[in-house]
Image (tube, rainbow, N blue to C red):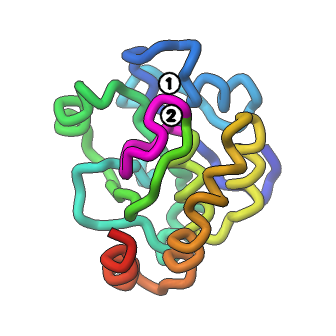
Amino acid sequence: MDQDEIRLHVLHLNQDDPKKCTAKKLARFGFAHLTSNKYKIPAGSIILSPFTRRVVSPADRRTAERRGITVVDCSWQHAREVFWSLRGNFRRLPFLVPVNPVNYGHPGQLSSAEALAATLYIIGYKEQAKKIMSIFKWGPNFFVMNKEPLEAYSGCKSWEEVLSEEKDFI
């Protein structure tokens, strides 16, 4: 990881097929730090969660620069119970369409890598976002599929503006 890149963290709970796990691949390439202990999530880190109203916006950039971004890698079947057990600085991603082979075309069901890349893109770290997705055959297509919403979200000033933009894409 370069010094001018955001630190990426993964709370990895080993609930999915390890061969299809994008989080483990990010860690193997040195793009993210994995932990299986929820108490090792860095304090103040932005934790991506589908169960909060507040969306990621460019206003989160300073927090991400200081504290990093954390994604929780767990089965969608167990997500609700996992997130209820966590405390932190939660943000959800606005409407985007995954291109990963497991959830292709199912809005909102992004892989860990897609979620981290989308967050980086929205807060203005577009090159880092593209860099982490370049390790997946399907990765660059994430930006092709979601070009219009990602550009719209990254041009907003606040999470309320992102919510307003999101309505145009749903």
Give the secondary structure at mark 1: strand
141 left or right, relative to 53: right
Q: Which residue is mark 1?
A: 35
Image spot of residue 46 (x, y percent): 43, 54
Image spot of residue 144 (x, y percent): 66, 60
* Marks 1/2: CA–CA distance: 6 Å
Residue 156, disc: none
Does the magenta run of residues contain 111? yes
Q: Are marks 1 and 2 in contact (CB under 8 Å)?
A: yes
Does the magenta run of residues contain 39? no
Residue projecting furthest to the right: 2
Q: Which amino acid type is shown beneath numbered disc 2?
A: Val
Q: Residues within 10 Å of mark 2 (few under 14, many from 20)?
A: many
Q: Which residues are magenta?
A: 101-112
The quadrant in which residue 11 appears is top left
The quadrant in which residue 12 appears is top left
Q: Residue at x 43, y 30 (%)?
A: 73
> Is residue 45 in view?
yes
Q: Which residue is mark 2?
A: 10
Image spot of residue 143 (x, y percent): 65, 58
Looking at the image, is mark 1 or mark 2 earlier in the sequence? 2
Q: Residues within 10 Å of mark 1 (few under 14, many from 20)?
A: some
129 left or right, relative to 91: right
159 left or right, relative to 130: left
Q: Is residue 11 above or below residue 57?
A: above
Q: Residue at x 49, y 84 (%)?
A: 156
